[in-house]
Amino acid sequence: MNRCEDCIHFRSAPFQARIAGCFHPDHMPGKQKAAYLDEQQIPGDHEAINRDGDCGEYTARPERPSFLSRLFGLGA
């Protein structure tokens, strides 16, 4: 069972839109190549894509480093 919130492709749209969805290139109906046009990207409907919890493009997010390792710049 895959949860969309644990996938690296799931995020909120940048800037004012705040639309949560799947930002995998294959699932986005509208995408922009230029970075300054990020606010015009339209994410895919993550609930419809992952209805049964078996999304084929699911990639788990890497674990976040501990606070101390981020503070002192330890690790990768």
Image: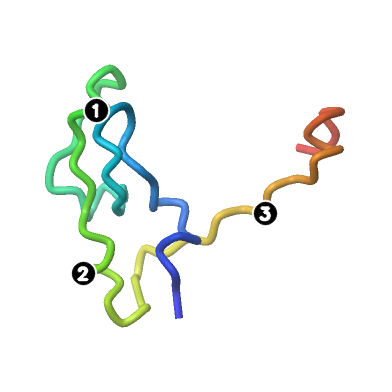
Left or right of residue 75: residue 38:
left
Rendering coords of residue 9 (x, y %)? 39, 51
**Looking at the rendering, which quadrant does residue 4 occupy?**
bottom left
When the figure is inspected, residue 27 is found, relative to residue 58, above or below; the finding is above
- Residue 63 is marked as 3
Chosen colour scheme: rainbow
Q: Residue flagged by tag 3: what amino acid is it?
A: Glu
Q: Residue at x 75, y 37 (%)?
A: 76
Query: Dot 2, crowdedness within 10 Å: few (<14), some or many (≥20)?
Result: few
**Looking at the rendering, which quadrant does residue 12 occupy?**
top left
Of all residues, the one furthest to the left in this rendering is 29
Choose the circle earlier in sequence order: 3 or 2.
2
Query: Dot 3, crowdedness within 10 Å: few (<14), some or many (≥20)?
Result: few
Callout 3: SS: loop
When the figure is inspected, residue 42 is found, relative to residue 16, above or below; the finding is below
| Label 2 – label 1 distance at C-alpha | 22 Å
Residue named by callout 1: 39
Left or right of residue 64: residue 5:
left
Q: Residue at x 13, y 41 (%)?
A: 30
Rendering coords of residue 52 (x, y %)? 31, 82
Query: Dot 1, crowdedness within 10 Å: few (<14), some or many (≥20)?
Result: some
In this rendered view, identify the residue nearer to me: 65 or 26. Answer: 65
Rendering coords of residue 54 (x, y %)? 36, 78
Choose the circle earlier in sequence order: 2 or 1.
1
| Label 3 – label 1 distance at C-alpha | 27 Å
